[in-house]
Structure formats: C-alpha cells, structure tokens
Image (cartoon, rainbow, N blue to C red):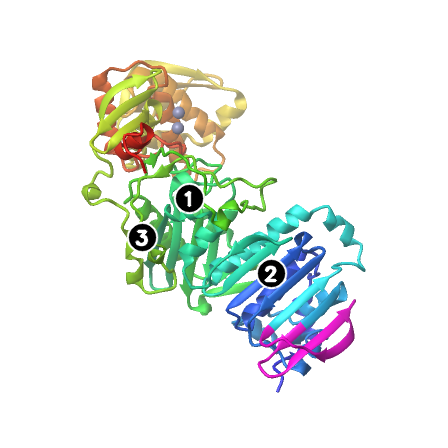
Amino acid sequence: MGKIEVMSEDLANKIAAGEVVEKTMNVVKELVENSIDAKSTEIKINLIDSGVKEITVIDDGIGMDKSDAVLAFSRHATSKLKTLEDLFYVSSLGFRGEALPSIASVSHVNLKTCNGSVGTEVEIEGGTIKEVGSSDLKKGTRITVTKLFYNTPVRLKYLKNLYTELANITDYVNKMALSFPNIKFVLTNNDKVLLNTDGRGNLLKVIGNIYGIELTKKMIYIDANNDDYEIKGYISYPECARTSKNNITVLVNGRSIRNSELTKIIIESYHTYIPESKYPIVVLNIETDPILIDVNIHPTKMDIKFSKIDTLKELINKAVKEKLETINLIPEIKEIYKEDENISSSIPLYNYEEESPKPNVLEYSLNLEVKEDKEDYNVLVKDEDENKFNDMPVKEEQADSNRIKKMYPVGVVHATYIIAENEDGMYIIDQHAAAERINYEKYLEKLTTHDNTSIDLLIPIKLEFSNKDYIILKENMQILTDMGFVIEEFGINTLLIRSHPYWLPDYAQEEAIKKIIDIVIMTEDFDNYKFIDRIAATLACKMSIKANDRITLTDMEDLLERLRNTKNPFTCPHGRPTIITYSNYELEKLFKRVMN
Ligand code: ZN
Ligand code: ZN
C-alpha cells in the first residue's frame, strides 16, 4: 500500500500561503528534505550551473512504489500530514506535500525510484505527467530537475545570480550536514565537489568538512543543561571569528532553526573576546520537549519560539562564558603551510551577508596539542564520555587561577609592543590593549558595586552644554548621582561638578568626567549592563597608556602581572588581542634548529 495521501485543500492552502518555488535553493531544499524523510543514509546533490540548468538529488532511502511515484506529483499529496494540528508535532521535514508538484509545474522532472522491489520512472513536463514506466534503479530515489523556471519570467533573473544561488545552496546543505551528521552528504556543482561528509555521525568532522580541518582544532566542545533544556555543541576560539553571523548554527532537536534571540545571546557571550563586527563559528544543538517550542512554519525557514527562553539564554550564555574562561586563548604565530589536499579546504566559505567568499586563511593558530588521529574527533550526539578529549585542551599547569603563566619582559618595540618570555616561548604584548583590559575590568567592577563614595574636587568643574544636551542630562541626573557624582545646576545650560566617583584617576579627572557625561548624553537606552560596559570600555581606552608611550621595564613587569590576573587576559574590551606568542618549538622551526 502506498504511503502518500492527498491532504485536504484547506490544509494545503494554509501551508502553501506565501510559498512559491522561486529559487533553486528551495528546490534543492524540498528534494533533500524528502530524501531525509525517506530515511536515507546518503544524499548526493549534483548541480549544473548552480542548479539553474540541472539539479539531481540521489538518495538511498526507502523509495516509492508506483502509485506513490505518480501521486507524488499531483497537487497537495503528502505522506506525512492530515490535519493542521499535525503540523506542530510534525517529526519529518518535508511537510509540504505540494512541493514536488510546485517544482514540476515550472520545470522538467525525471523521477526514478525503487521501494526495494518495484522500480518506477516518471517523466513530467510543466506539471503534466508525460510517461510512467519501470526503472532499473535498485533502491532509493533519483530526481532530476531540468529547465527550471523555463515557463516563468524569473528564469532570466536567476541566470544573473548563479553565484548567490550557489552560495545559498551550499549554506543550506552545510546546515543539513551539521544537523544530520549520520547522513553522508555530497554536493557538487559542475562536477566540482563542494561538500563531502562521511555520514559517520561525527559532528566535529562535519565541521572540518565545511570549514577546513585546521578549524576543528579550535572548536571547543560545550555541554550544559537545566530542567528544560540540554545544550551540546562546538564553539570556536575567539581568534577564528568571521565576518558573518551565518556561521552560527542553532539546532533544536537536531533541526536547523532560526531564532535571532539565541544568535544574539551567543554573540553576547563572546563580548570583548571578539571585535563587535565579528562573529564566532558555533554549532549548538538544543534538546528539549517539543511542548516548550512553538514552531512558526514558514515555507523557507523554521522560526521557533521557546517557552522559558530566558532560562535557555542564561544556560547558553553561562556555558559559553565559562568555557571561554577556562582555556588559554593566546593565539600562536605559526609558519603557514599550504593547506593539505583535503577537498574541503578549497571550499570558499559562502555567506548570505557577504558579497564575496572569504578564503579560509587562519593568520595564526593556537598552541594546542590536538591528536592527529582522526578517530579522536568527537561526536555531538554520542555519550558524554566520548567528548572528554575536547574538554581537555587546557594544559595541566594552567589549572591554577591564572590562565597564563608568568611572563618576563625583556624590552619593547616601537614603544608599543612589549617582548616577554617564559619557559614556553616568546610573547608580544600590545601595551595599550593590555592596559586597557586591566582598566576595563577595574572600572567594570567599580561601576557594578554600586558604591557611590565620592571625592570632592578642589576646584569644581564648570561645564556648559547645548540646551538639548542639558535637558537630556537633567533627565538622567540620577544615573550620575548613583555613580558618585555631586552636580549642581549653575546658570543657563551649565552644570557644576563638585565631586566625582572615588575611583576616577587623579591625573585625568576632568577628561574622564567629560567622557562619562558624553556617554550619558549619547545613550538612548540605559540598559544597565550595556551602559556600564560602555563607560568602562571608554574610560579604559582613555586612561590607559597609549602606543608610543615610553614605559620602564618595571612598569612592564607590573603591567604583565596585572594582565595575567584579569579575568580575560587575551583581548582588550574591543575584542582585539592583547598577547600573541611564538612557542619555543615554533621559534626553533623558524630558525631551522629543528626540521620537521
Ligand atoms: Zn583603546
Ligand atoms: Zn581596545
């Protein structure tokens, strides 16, 4: 008996609302999701000219019998759903039964399928079945779509956008490979392999297939749970940050979804670890009871709303932050060799947001002893103890409260870069960035302790404002008072600062006061954390030694020691690195004292 039934017109219309098969990516998506639903373990997607000329999807799934194969192209057929309610508990991906007919109506389709006993071949042109016969296919389904959009005006438009189409398809298939590490995905365009995973269930390996094998050494396994949610996945070292948010993949119960709040909280968890315009590479799976999610099914994306989103956000934020706080993140400078022959390393990284692909070049890499043995990759979906190796990269001797070893300064270059050493190697420290980190954490602490102790100024500072700024300031005077300012009105649009918070540096009080007041004037939303963070970062930048400021060796010792004692000694508040290193081994290699 066939598995496909025709769903009610009403349901079909509701699902179809807004859907048009208008991009090659959507066609690929429909076909691939049908293949996944057919329990395939291997899915090959072969494109010609980004799919505009031809899309072939071959799977080894359960296939269809003759009646299903014919019915598959009739409007609104579905094997999965009967009522609208089912939509919300649907466990399969290709819930839109009319996808195949939609595709068939704007193209030529050849379908070969076999359910294990009978092989069927169906030929459709512009939605009309031309031929039904038998096929020699032994198992699974093979669908070839040609002349896509041949009978619609969009065709020409897409011919101009081959690159974007390919970028979107690549991105989609990447995300499916990350969602289903147990399925082997092969994607080719004009015979060039763009992705080739092994389908052995190893998520880290899939990440390697997509981003290059080097990156897998810089992915950190995370794992956490609360009463409602369990999260598992990989987050990248801050140094691997990319220019697109699109490398943040969030899965719910193994399914790729979009939720801007979760993406935002992941980015925020990296706050000050990476610059604001850069984003980490993350693959995070959230396991939860479907009862806690509300799926807004839109034909082209999965938007999910979570009940108890706040506890989920907290869980993610804490897991990412805590992990970043346990690892030595000093980027190591290495001789860069040509990438190996691994096909994946030659894949350009496509992004929705970027016009051109960014080559996967890592300027420096970390000093982590990662075993070369490929079998040591971790599996997201497997047992916890399988993941030990990625929990590990912290070296034992760094297990004390300081994440980095003591460094001894030996000199300074261009009055900007301190050169230091210890038994592990040589370090280069940006003196401004380092001082900025120290001061930032100091101000942040002072600002969050709500101690409004103030110090009287010997000579009060008189500040004049425009009438607009004056009004804003008067409205927000309490914020300044809470910090420890004592301010009086002093004539037209003028304020008199009598006292300031005790922690402002003596040597630049006036400058610091003006900076804080500027921030109050410019701030639109006094979201407490962001406002305070901004003040701390701005003051830290202003109050820290600059590049080209000459400092003594003793000052350097002091600076390095204080940097070592910060919570995050690796980056300044703006996410720039404070330290980079050459390991002893790398130095020896560079000077050919050792050969490898
Ligand atoms: Zn600065
Ligand atoms: Zn900075």
Query: Residue 170 at x, y = what percent?
Result: 57, 53
Q: Which residue is mark 1?
A: 268
Q: Amino acid at mark 2?
A: Ile
CA distance separating discs 2 and 1: 36 Å
Element marked by disc 1: helix
Residue 180 among magenta residues: no
The picture quadrant for ligand 2 comes to top left
Residue kind at label 3, given as amino acid type: Asn
Of labels 3 and 1, earlier in sequence is: 1
Name the residue: 53% across, 47% down. 347
Q: Does residue 443 appear anywhere in the picture? A: no
Answer left or right for 509 relative to 249: left
Please name which of the two marks, 3 or 2, marks the residue nearer to the observer.
Answer: 2
Which is more N-terminal, label 1 or label 2? 2
Q: Earlier in the sequence, mark 3 or mark 2?
A: 2
- Secondary structure at badge 3 equals helix
Residue topped by disc 3 = 390
Which residue matches tag 2? 45
